[in-house]
């Protein structure tokens, strides 16, 4: 690439599927900006997308194949994989092998993985980490429409008169969609937004009404809404009679589950007036979009909750037209592409289910007889089968299940017993790679080429702008080489991702003729140059016949009758309820600036600044009752495991509920992976786990001392009761606690950081120590220790690492534990794009009389780039800061 040339590609984070433009910089490096021509984001990016250029370094990369701990070449590694899988199938049959893949794969990678598993190995045991976030929505759509068909697009959010956000912190998890909705609201003030979420999240900044529903009560709320629509005669009877079946049973089930409005409000933990207002708005508004995400899906009744939402749209005929519909949005960049190619254990390929007819069809197309006749094991059951010895060999690609799966301790035990564990990853050291027998170095974002499909069914190209480092290779290539070694070279002839895409497109159209929703046959004839230049487009894109401008506009669905189905759902409580031993409900989810298990985002110091360690959010009433103070370390424990987090007492939490982020893992500290505590119960239809409702108890972490270390060099501080590591701008930050005191803090500090000029202050009686190492006039590192968690702020200390020379005032401040009068503590970072802290914002708001987000942006730039911090800015302006 020449300097100034821009490559149009796609962001590798959430399911919004934003287009980005990557340009090389003179002197090295790249710039990343939003692509104004991409219809998903129209030039916007969130904080993570804006920081993509900061994540391209090679630190920690897996660069060569490794077999049993020894680096080797590709031939030996591929032979080891092929021989191991061949032997397992020969001894135990095809059900003894499995693949566990990821929404981080490109569609071409996914397609070859599915074909290898089901066609070459003859096993249906291929599932994906997308099972953990959107499988319940897939099940709901299939039951209602006869196919996994998402009927909405992003423009519907802007065209609606009422947008209902259910279990979706859109502002942090899909920030660009939040920005689009916020802009639409500004342009059309009559557009109403309702947020249904137990927490008051930053998304509530946009809400006309926030329904802080009791955890697990969503099924009753939507059953109550359906009964209300029936009672108030707010149904579209003509649409129901012509295009829907099962509605009588659905109405009866909702009526049986429902109570009167006061009783329903009490069950849902809501004020009757608020619930009544929502019901009236829904009944009286024609253009309604109900958008849901993990808060609905990640439930032991997630499929039924999804159908309860869809039922309300079918009952009112609010589907198949602009500005309306039931809209599930995905969490990963290519969860939708994985659904298309059969990356789920209960699907074949091209949205085909397991029927004898479909199995025979795919066998004919692939020329591979012996496909499995029935679905395979879904994610949680798959790892249980590994632990029980039923699955002997597993290949894990582009995911870290030892962190992301529920009951992670049991999953780790299972993998440690497996005869052959193969892991394809770009990272050398993760919780999962530590258990691998064979490690395969995979290319990552910026190094590989292919397609992804976003939440609105839009296929976009992801294009390479970097050469893969070392021996890293694209996943489709690795899979193809193994398939050839298994004797299937003719069925795996691929020389490029374009070859794979063309076959995928042909299969979608094979014996289709409009009978299946997923059809991109019109793209099957793309030449290499056309594939390379392919613009973003939404499916269906059939060949030789007209594609409908909007799915379901004609009232025809993919069921045998051609009618949609309303599914009779009976709301049910979560499988495990709080009790005396575990009295609180734990909810897990994402935070604004991190992604999955942080293998990419933690490379960007500006993304680490907003929340540098995992938090455990509690209502202040619960904190007082449990004797836990704000900022204290606490242990959250369930029947399945435990994790540690820094307590954040906030009224945005419901009393009796806790929230913890999913991102931290063993790579960043001890007992930080909250998945170890998560309830492993799954939805019986979708197999999706109950991430949003785990009974837990919470207690303070008992330690003899607490401390932190900031150091210019990376340290090894793992041998502690508690440790947490994160990269800052020019330094590393460590949070520590332990139950053993050293004989001398000065000696312990020197053992950590080395010799040089030391500034020290120790109060042995109070158990406090402050020490700073200075070399050549620069701060090399500092150590602060106290008997409790109450320690000086870190942000102003971090700023000192940017100083070329420390002056006398800086040295004095290190010993005082606070900045001097001439240097201010900016506070916890609010705006990651420009590094603007809370204290800086509060001071400017007060001193300059700033009253609007725009005024704050003009004064400090905060909120003027990606916009992800705007809800928090509004909170500061209003005096009640929005929490995560």
Image: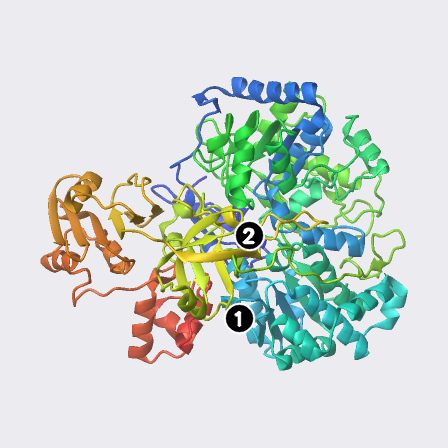
Residue 14 marker: 2
Asked if residue 763 is positioned above or below residue 654 in the image, the reply reads: above
Front residue of this view, candidates 813 and 116:
813
Is residue 470 visible in the rendered image? The answer is yes
Residue 625 percent coordinates (x, y): 42, 67
Instruction: Give the left or right position of residue 866, taking residue 236 as reference.
Output: left
Look at 82% across and 78% down and name the residue there. Answer: 233
Is residue 460 visible in the rendered image? The answer is no
Residue 771 percent coordinates (x, y): 16, 50
Look at 64% across and 80% down and name the residue there. Answer: 272
Q: Say how many tags the image has.
A: 2
Q: CA distance from mark 2 to mark 1?
A: 20 Å
**Precedes in sequence: disc 2 or disc 1:** 2
Residue 204 marker: 1
Residue 483 percent coordinates (x, y): 65, 24
Label 2, secondary structure: give it.
loop
Question: In the image, which is nearer the foreground, mark 2 or mark 1?
Answer: 1
Residue 765 placement: quadrant: bottom left
Instruction: Give the left or right position of residue 831, taking residue 332 as reference.
Output: left
Front residue of this view, candidates 388 and 33:
388
Instruction: Give the left or right position of residue 485, taking residue 423 as reference.
Output: right
Instruction: Give the left or right position of residue 867, taking residue 565 as reference.
Output: left
Residue 151 placement: quadrant: bottom right
Q: Are marks 2 and 1 in contact (CB under 8 Å)?
A: no
């Amino acid at each position: 690439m020449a300097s100034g040339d821009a490559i149009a590609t796609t962001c590798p984070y959430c399911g919004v599927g934003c287009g980005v433009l990557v340009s090389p910089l003179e002197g090295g490096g790249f710039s990343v900006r939003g692509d104004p021509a991409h219809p998903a984001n129209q030039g916007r990016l969130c904080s993570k997308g804006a920081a993509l250029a900061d994540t391209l370094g090679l630190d920690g990369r897996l660069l060569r194949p490794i077999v049993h701990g020894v680096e080797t070449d590709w031939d030996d590694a591929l032979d080891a994989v092929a021989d191991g899988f061949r032997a397992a199938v020969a001894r135990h049959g095809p059900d003894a092998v499995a693949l566990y893949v990821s929404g981080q794969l490109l569609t071409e990678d996914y397609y070859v993985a599915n074909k290898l598993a089901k066609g070459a190995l003859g096993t249906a045991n291929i599932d994906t980490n997308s099972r953990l976030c959107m499988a319940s929505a897939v099940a709901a759509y299939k039951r209602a429409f006869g196919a996994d068909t998402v009927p909405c697009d992003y423009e519907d959010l802007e065209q609606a008169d009422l947008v209902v956000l259910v279990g979706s912190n859109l502002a942090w998890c899909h920030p660009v969609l939040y920005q689009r909705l916020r802009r639409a609201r500004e342009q059309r003030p009559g557009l109403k937004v309702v947020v249904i979420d137990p927490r008051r999240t930053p998304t509530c900044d946009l809400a006309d009404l926030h329904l802080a529903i009791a955890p697990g009560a969503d099924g009753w709320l939507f059953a109550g809404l359906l009964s209300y629509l029936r009672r108030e005669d707010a149904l579209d009877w003509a649409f129901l009679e012509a295009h829907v079946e099962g509605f009588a049973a659905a109405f009866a089930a909702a009526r049986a589950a429902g109570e009167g409005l006061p009783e329903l409000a009490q069950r849902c933990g809501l004020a009757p007036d608020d619930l009544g207002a929502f019901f009236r708005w829904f009944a009286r508004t024609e253009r309604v979009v109900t958008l849901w995400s993990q808060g609905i899906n990640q439930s032991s009744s997630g499929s039924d909750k999804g159908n309860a939402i869809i039922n309300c749209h079918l009952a009112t005929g609010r589907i198949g037209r602009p500005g309306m519909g039931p809209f599930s949005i995905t969490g990963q960049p290519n969860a939708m592409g994985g659904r298309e190619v059969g990356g789920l254990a209960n699907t074949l390929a091209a949205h085909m289910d397991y029927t004898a007819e479909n199995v025979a069809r795919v066998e004919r197309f692939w020329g591979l007889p012996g496909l499995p006749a029935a679905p395979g094991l879904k994610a949680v059951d798959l790892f249980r089968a590994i632990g029980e010895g039923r699955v002997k060999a597993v290949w894990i690609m582009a995911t870290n299940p030892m962190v992301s799966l529920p009951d992670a301790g049991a999953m780790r035990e299972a993998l440690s017993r497996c005869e052959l564990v193969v892991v394809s990853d770009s990272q050398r050291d993760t919780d999962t790679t530590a258990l691998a027998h064979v490690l395969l170095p995979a290319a990552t974002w910026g190094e590989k080429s292919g397609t992804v499909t976003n939440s609105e069914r839009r296929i976009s190209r992801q294009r390479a702008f970097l050469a893969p480092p070392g021996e890293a290779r694209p996943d489709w290539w690795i899979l193809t080489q193994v398939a050839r070694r298994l004797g299937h070279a003719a069925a795996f002839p691929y020389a490029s991702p374009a070859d794979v895409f063309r076959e995928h497109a042909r299969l979608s159209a094979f014996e289709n003729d409009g009978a299946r929703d997923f059809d991109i046959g019109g793209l099957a004839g793309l030449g290499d140059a056309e594939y390379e230049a392919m613009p973003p487009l939404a499916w269906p894109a059939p060949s030789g016949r007209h594609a409908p401008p909007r799915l379901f506009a004609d009232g025809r669905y993919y069921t045998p009758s051609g009618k949609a189905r309303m599914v009779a759902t009976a709301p049910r409580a979560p499988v495990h309820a709080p009790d005396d031993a575990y009295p609180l409900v734990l909810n897990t989810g994402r935070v604004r600036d991190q992604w999955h298990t942080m293998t990419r985002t933690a490379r960007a110091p500006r993304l680490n600044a907003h929340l540098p360690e995992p938090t455990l959010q509690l209502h202040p009433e619960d904190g007082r009752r449990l004797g836990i103070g704000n900022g204290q370390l606490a242990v959250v424990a369930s029947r399945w495991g435990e994790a540690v987090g820094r307590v954040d007492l906030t009224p945005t939490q419901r009393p009796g509920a806790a929230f913890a982020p999913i991102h931290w893992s063993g790579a960043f500290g001890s007992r930080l992976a909250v998945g170890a505590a998560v309830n492993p119960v799954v939805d019986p239809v979708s197999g999706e786990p109950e991430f949003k409702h785990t009974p837990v108890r919470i207690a303070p972490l008992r330690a003899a001392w607490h401390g932190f270390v900031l150091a210019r060099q990376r340290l090894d501080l793992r041998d502690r009761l508690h440790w947490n590591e994160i990269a800052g701008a020019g330094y590393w930050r460590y949070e520590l606690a332990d139950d053993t005191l050293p004989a001398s803090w000065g000696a312990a500090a020197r053992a950590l950081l080395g010799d040089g000029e030391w500034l020290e202050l120790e109060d042995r009686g109070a158990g406090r120590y402050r020490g700073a190492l200075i070399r050549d006039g620069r701060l090399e590192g500092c150590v602060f220790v106290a008997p409790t968690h109450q320690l000086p702020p870190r942000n102003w200390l971090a700023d000192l690492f940017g100083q070329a020379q420390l002056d006398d005032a800086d040295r004095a401040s290190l010993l005082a534990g606070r900045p001097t009068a001439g240097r201010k503590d900016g506070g916890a970072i609010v705006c990651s794009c420009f590094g603007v802290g809370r204290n800086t914002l509060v001071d400017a708001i007060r001193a300059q009389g700033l009253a609007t987000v725009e005024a704050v942006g003009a004064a400090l730039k905060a909120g003027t780039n990606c916009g992800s911090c705007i809800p928090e800015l509004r909170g500061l302006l209003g005096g009640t800061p929005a929490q995560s």
